[in-house]
Amino acid sequence: MTHIGSKLVAPEASALEAGAMRGELAGIISRYLLDDGMVSTPVPGLHFFRQSVAQHSVHAIYRPAFALVVQGSKRAVLGDQTFEYDHRHGLLVSVDLPMISHIFVAGADQPYLCLVIEIDPTVLRTLLAQSPLPAAPPAPPAAAVRGISVAPLEPVLMDAVLRLCRLLDNQQDIAALAPLVQQEILYRLLAGPQGHWLRDVALSQGHAPRITEAVAWLQRHYARPLRVEELAQQVGMSLSSLHHHFKAATALSPLQYQKQLRLREARRLMLVGEADAATASLLVGYESPSQFSREYSRLYGAPPARDIARLRSAGQPAVF
């Protein structure tokens, strides 16, 4: 038997209930998004995405959040690992990660629909301080730990997400009820199979909080020359430990992570018209425009000018 909200239902009824919940979620998202793109809803931290054609090689920083696909499928690549998620699987991101992704199931009649709920670390810590959690499932081996995971959607989690989205039809209730439902969603994530990294970050356990701190430091100082020894000292880790656990969480070394931050910021500056390629390369910390162009082409598959022209003609794609 399975609990959905306050009800106890048989597995076969649970599948029907999940289908009905997805249908209702699709209706809510479609009312807010008539065309492709993204929208931030009146519920703080809740965003909707819609895409009616398949997309390839979308580069973006995934922020800490929970993503639930209502319709369609998507594939996200981190280093040498691929994460596929659809209406049966939820995506949990626990630390800022540079991802390459594409939507591979989408169509005009059945567009890709997805909702994203941001994860606020302050709310996470408050919840853990106030509400003891049930025992977590066995932790994965250290080599398998990533700041991103995909797991089957549990009916109780999907039910809570639906109740959060229903508040959009009664917006006078959002201020009072949305924080309570969002806490329930965080509780379900913390107690579920994807909750290990979230727990460690919130409770300052293990290496998770130090890696999160290292990521934040790199984001603040990406344009500076990086001495990894300085970063290790900054977060209170040995050099070898930082390398090992940083790569375990992000699939990149600190230097590779910094390079991707630089290239992504340069791409943004060029895309919004704030700088040409040579100026952007200097602003993000490159001393050699030719090195910048080589590394940019290696990451994005085309030199800066050609890549920016392609992006402008295609428009801005949805991320999750």
Image (cartoon, rainbow, N blue to C red):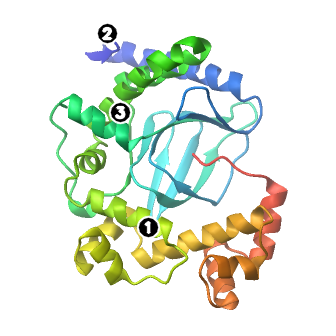
Query: 159 above or below 236?
Result: above
Which comes sooner in the sequence, label 3 or label 1? 1
- Can residue 191 be seen? no
**Circle 3: residue type:** Leu
- Any mark on residue 6, and which? 2
Figure check: 226 above or below 314? below
Residue 71 at x, y percent in the picture: 59, 32
Q: Earlier in the sequence, mark 2 or mark 3?
A: 2
Q: Nearer the viewer, residue 197 or 1?
A: 197
Vertical order, 232 against 110 (above or below): below
Q: Can you give x and y, in whole percent of width and height, for residue 111 in the image?
A: 69, 35
Q: Residue at x 77, y 34 (%)?
A: 35
Task: Tell me where residue 185 sits by quadrant.
Answer: top left
The residue that disc 1 covers is 80
Q: Secondary structure at mark 1?
A: loop
The amino acid type found where label 2 is placed reads Ser
- What residue do we see at 61% from left, 74% from top? 299
Left or right position of 64 against 294:
left
Q: Nearer the viewer, residue 159 or 151?
A: 159
Which quarter of the picture shows residue 264?
bottom right
Marks 2 and 1 sit apart, C-alpha to C-alpha, by 41 Å
The residue labelled by disc 3 is: 186
User: Taking 315 as reference, is 125 left or right?
Assistant: left
Q: Earlier in the sequence, mark 2 or mark 1?
A: 2
Specify the amino acid type for callout 1: Asp
Question: Residue 278: percent from the left, percent from the top?
Answer: 75, 83
* Residue 95 % position (x, y): 40, 54
Q: CA distance from mark 3 to mark 1?
A: 28 Å
Report if the CB atoms under discs 2 and 3 are less than 8 Å apart. no
